[in-house]
Image (cartoon, helix red, strand yellow):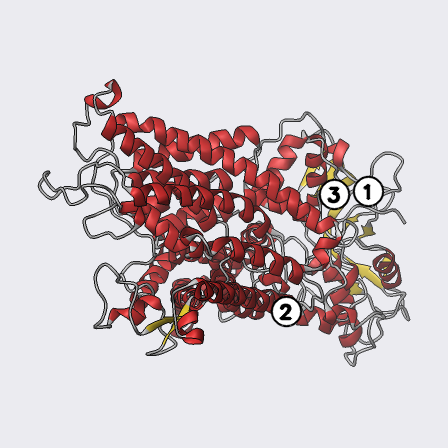
Amino acid sequence: MAMWQGAMDNRGFQQGSFNSFRSSSSDEDLMDIPGTAMDFSMRDDVPPLDGEIEEEKSYNGGGIGSSNRMMDFLEEPIPGVGTYDDFNTIDWVREKSRDRDRHREITNKSKESTWALIHSVSDAFSGWLLMLLIGLLSGSLAGLIDISAHWMTDLKEGICTEGFWFNHEHCCWNSEHVTFEDRDKCPEWNSWSQLLISTDEGAFAYIVNYFMYVLWALLFAFLAVSLVKVFAPYACGSGIPEIKTILSGFIIRGYLGKWTLIIKTITLVLAVSSGLSLGKEGPLVHVACCCGNILCHCFNKYRKNEAKRREVLSAAAAAGVSVAFGAPIGGVLFSLEEVSYYFPLKTLWRSFFAALVAAFTLRSINPFGNSRLVLFYVEFHTPWHLFELVPFILLGIFGGLWGALFIRTNIAWCRKRKTTQLGKYPVIEVLVVTAITAILAFPNEYTRMSTSELISELFNDCGLLDSSKLCDYENRFNTSKGGELPDRPAGVGVYSAMWQLALTLILKIVITIFTFGMKIPSGLFIPSMAVGAIAGRLLGVGMEQLAYYHHDWAIFNSWCSQGADCITPGLYAMVGAAACLGGVTRMTVSLVVIMFELTGGLEYIVPLMAAAMTSKWVADALGREGIYDAHIRLNGYPFLEAKEEFAHKTLAMDVMKPRRNDPLLTVLTQDSITVEDVETIISETTYSGFPVVVSRESQRLVGFVLRRDLIISIENARKKQDGVVSTSIIYFTEHSPPMPPYTPPTLKLRNILDLSPFTVTDLTPMEIVVDIFRKLGLRQCLVTHNGRLLGIITKKDVLKHIAQMANQDPDSILFN
């Protein structure tokens, strides 16, 4: 029997029982994964990881049921038919068609009775109710994560004697012994040296604090990686590459389940508190999508339809970014620009509502005590000048170079982790990187503080009351400009801070490469913003001093008079942060809106746009992929990038299976194949579906039937229909012909047959075929010639062909 290259292998299901299909039909179910890395192979899309599947090894067709009549599957729906196996792609067209049929039926019934009308209204309202619940849960979890991470970060340096649950800032808020200059010092807050050796001065006290800082960091990191490894391996990383893949139609069971949500929430707090160069913003998108997926199971409309569920997940991703940055509009645009594959107008409205509710919930919790949704919210009041576009564009160039460098080096390191012994020791890797980070971070106050606090300090526009070293200017209390703080010469503290920030920049650039991708929750937004903010602040202070000492230069004298407040270093830090984040992720519109919402002013849109576009152009010139697309390709996920153009002049016949000299295509006939023949095909092949033809001689196409639906239908028939044996004939026709007496009952399986599979001719250009796969989300497409079936093209074949045309190894691009 000939073979064709299926859309997804399903060896784990080829001999499973009906119960095993029902038990693993939900994305919420947890997969029993013994390791910490997802291991996909080219030949087998379902790795031997699912305990439910491994328990049952034989497909014997079940027993004979007690019903004496012939079963017509046109009349009775079969439980389990139409669901998908793990590591398979959904059929977008079929799912949307099902939803239209369901909606049409509800609409028609609503005219018959009041109860049906109420049911119709509740069905229409259920989507908005689901968005409300997602926003409330996402906002609450984000607030919990923010408060816990702030407290545990301060725990590395000391503890509050008035109540151990207070962080440093809250501990000193109500103290009566705090002066304005030493606002961070109060008798209620004790460092570890004060607790252990009763003094905070001297070399020994410094060593004690140093040791406790490193010890707490190692403890937090060890707990994080251990919980991920033991309970939820899918909780590692940022989660955005996998969410992009899931939203494109791929199924990864357990990735958005309840255990992943619980463990990711806990370990995200631990990972951020350990002081590693990572952020919580990316993982918050994963947390919000877990909330959306779990809440979908409360509504039949979304639980039973994979396409509808993905609309909900797109809205949940928007809510995740909304609580991460306090940017509801930016969250919606991020979901649209970066992660979503299918984003209808209705999803846009609901995403906005979910993001709004999530932001309102987080604002009600007020985790930072400043009535803001993020720690580094800032407001600037000084206008920028046209000449400053030059340094802003320079920051964009730096961001693009940094982004391209980071992607190449990080992907190279992650590939080394996957292909060497390093990947087998995730706990040791995390502990080593944590130890190096903590040892190098403690001596420098800018690396010792949390990255969010660092960004907040870099964004800050120095005022009269600021005590930071970055604001240690000479003549700082000269307010001759009517209370406006003029440009002034830098003092000793500013120069000291510049050196410390330069060392911080080097450490952040190097250590982030090795941190992102480890087996703990790790986001990239905050480290990237920190790199850009440091570079921007350094450039901003340099420009400020240049304008002060050389205000008579031609580039300054037209708009910057002596002593005027011309340059805002905090603005340069913000532009640099946007440039570096854009260089790494290749975001543009959503990035500018997020940064605009962080500053609360429209005046700085142009500098942000200039830096974001410059960084994207520079980074694209050095490499087309953003960090998330690069990790999708590294992990071999079946993701068809909609932004890339396919420009090669190949035809469908060049890609389809079977090729020349290959065995013929495995097909089923519409009225002459027996149960035994089908069971033989199922047991000897691992394909996801089979074309149905009129006869083997004519090869005229009738439709397409999925392997999973065949298995479930045959087993269900054996249980419920008396007399079904191996010699029973399976009919895919509408009417079965009269049978001679004493012949076994027949099976009528037309109901599981897709009568309108997508077909192309053998001379169709591949650029059209690729476009069809992208825009319709197809799993497979049949190839015909003059109406006769020639072959099949699957999503896997398309991805392999694109890789081959790009001079990449096609066997390493998928499920590696």
The percent coordinates of residue 130 (x first, y second) are 42, 65
Residue 323 vs 797, above or below: the answer is below
| Disc 1 to disc 2, C-alpha distance | 42 Å
Residue furthest toward the top?
A: 554
Looking at the rendered structure, the kind of residue marked 1 is Gln
The residue that mark 1 highlights is 699
Q: Residue at x 80, y 62 (%)?
A: 14
Question: On the rendered structure, is 552 left or right of 225?
Answer: left
Q: Residue at x 87, y 57 (%)?
A: 684
Dot 3 alpha-carbon crowd within 10 angstroms: few under 14, some 14 to 19, many 20 or more: some
Report helix, strand or loop for mark 2: loop
Q: Residue at x 30, y 69 (%)?
A: 170
Report helix, strand or loop for mark 3: loop
Looking at the rendered structure, the kind of residue marked 3 is Ser
Q: Closer to the N terminus: mark 3 or mark 1?
A: 1
The residue that mark 2 highlights is 30
Of 284 and 686, nearer the camera is 284
| Disc 3 to disc 1, C-alpha distance | 34 Å
Residue 496 vs 313, above or below: the answer is above
